[in-house]
Image (cartoon, rainbow, N blue to C red):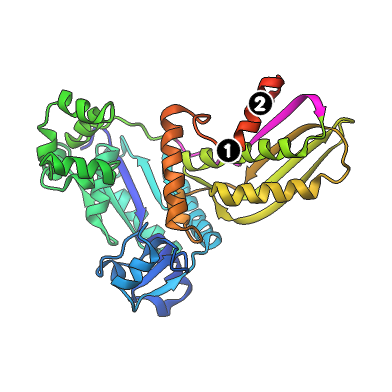
Amino acid sequence: MYDRAILHLDLDSFFVSVECLKNSSLLGKPLVIGGTSNRGVVASCSYEARRFGVHSAMPMKMALRLCPQATIIKGDMDSYSKYSGIVTDIIAEEAPVYEKASIDEFYLDLTGMDKHFGCFKWSSELRQKVIKDSGLPISFGLSINKTVSKVGTGEAKPNGTKYVPNGAEKGFLAPLPVGRIPGVGDQTHKKLNFMGVRTIETLSQIPIRLLEREFGKPGRSLWEKANAIDNTPIVPYHEQKSMSKERTFMEDTLDVTMMKHLLLDMADKLSFELRASGKLASTITVKIRYADFNTYTKQKNITYTANDRLLGQHVIDLFDKVYERRQLIRLIGVKYSGLVQGNYQINLFDDTMEHIQLMQQMDRIRRRFGADSIMRASGLVKAKVLRDQLPMDGG
């Protein structure tokens, strides 16, 4: 019996599974989803394609070299969001407390249910309900915490279950490669391998001080996860509907160039917030308020994205359409709505590897030094505006 019971559910090759549900002739074939140009990126792939070495975030050109017989499909985020919603509704109806970690991944707190139902039995019944009602394969891991359960799900895939008994967590993790630990990215993995650390057991035996010296604060987290220690709570899921930013000028303005720079800066910051919170937007709204306090908005529905470049282009297009009176403006604003859970990395249907890497590097700098630590060259115009005025910022 668990003192604490955490269930991790993950839909198997979610995008691929949805495409196969829509078109059964794709079942059993090597399937790659992502950007369809040679400079595109793989967002997801079937297990049949993975046998050839194809994986997500790989350049499409390389994927086609490894698996030339693969079927390439540009992703359909509307369909994926629809099926994610179906699964979310099933879980919400059954689960006492749940957290939606991404578009296809969930954590549930089942603490105390062993006394009444049996956590594994209840989890298995929930999994069967999801499969029956949605038509999608799903795997789960069950243990005392998020880390072990997530690793368990990875070991259970495809379309399986993994139960890690209370007290068996370290033994379960010990023989596995360090790359299986959630949060260990490519750079950390390379550094650990360079140190001769290849299994979780070896990592668990390294002194915390040494790991903190090599990796900083994340070093302690590495040691804790390797030793099956994770007290991270389940964060109850609440759907955020929108996010926005506004700028009210102390002096009304006709400076269109300056306003466009400010709008692009707002769009960039909101795009970063989307990616940081694991969300994608499907609706953009631009608002202007004239000096006479008349307020106008223009809205556009788009394919789900968190791409700063695409969102910025749409924001400027909407501003050009809504700003028709050529009068002094008091306020401008941007809002992203129609939000869904989903890491941006899984929505790379049009991006090139170069832009993806640029966004990733900029996001790392922002996370470390703050949202204003890096900006477009046009942001220098914004900085001058902020020196000259004392605007009120909302959002």
- Examine the rendered structure and indicate whether residue 223 appears above or below residue 317: above
Answer whether residue 249 is magenta in the image.
Answer: yes
Q: Secondary structure at mark 1?
A: loop
Marks 2 and 1, how far apart at CA: 12 Å
Q: Residues within 10 Å of mark 2 (few under 14, many from 20)?
A: few
Q: Which residues are magenta?
A: 236-252
211 sits to left or right of 119: left
The amino acid pointed to by label 2 is Lys
Q: Earlier in the sequence, mark 2 or mark 1?
A: 1
Q: Secondary structure at mark 2?
A: helix
Of residue 55 and residue 232, the one placed in the foreground of this image is 55
Answer whether residue 12 is magenta in the image.
Answer: no
The image shows residue 253 at horizontal and vertical percentages of 81, 31
Residue 273 bears which disc, if any? Answer: none
The image shows residue 56 at horizontal and vertical percentages of 35, 58
Q: Quadrant of the C terminus?
A: top right
Residue appearing at x 32%, y 49% in the figure: 122
Residue appearing at x 30%, y 65% in the figure: 54
Of residue 47 and residue 290, the one placed in the foreground of this image is 290
Q: Residues within 10 Å of mark 1 (few under 14, many from 20)?
A: few
Q: Is residue 393 visible?
A: no
Q: Which residue is mark 1?
A: 377
The secondary structure that dominates the magenta segment is strand
Q: Which residue is mark 2?
A: 384
The image shows residue 185 at horizontal and vertical percentages of 29, 44
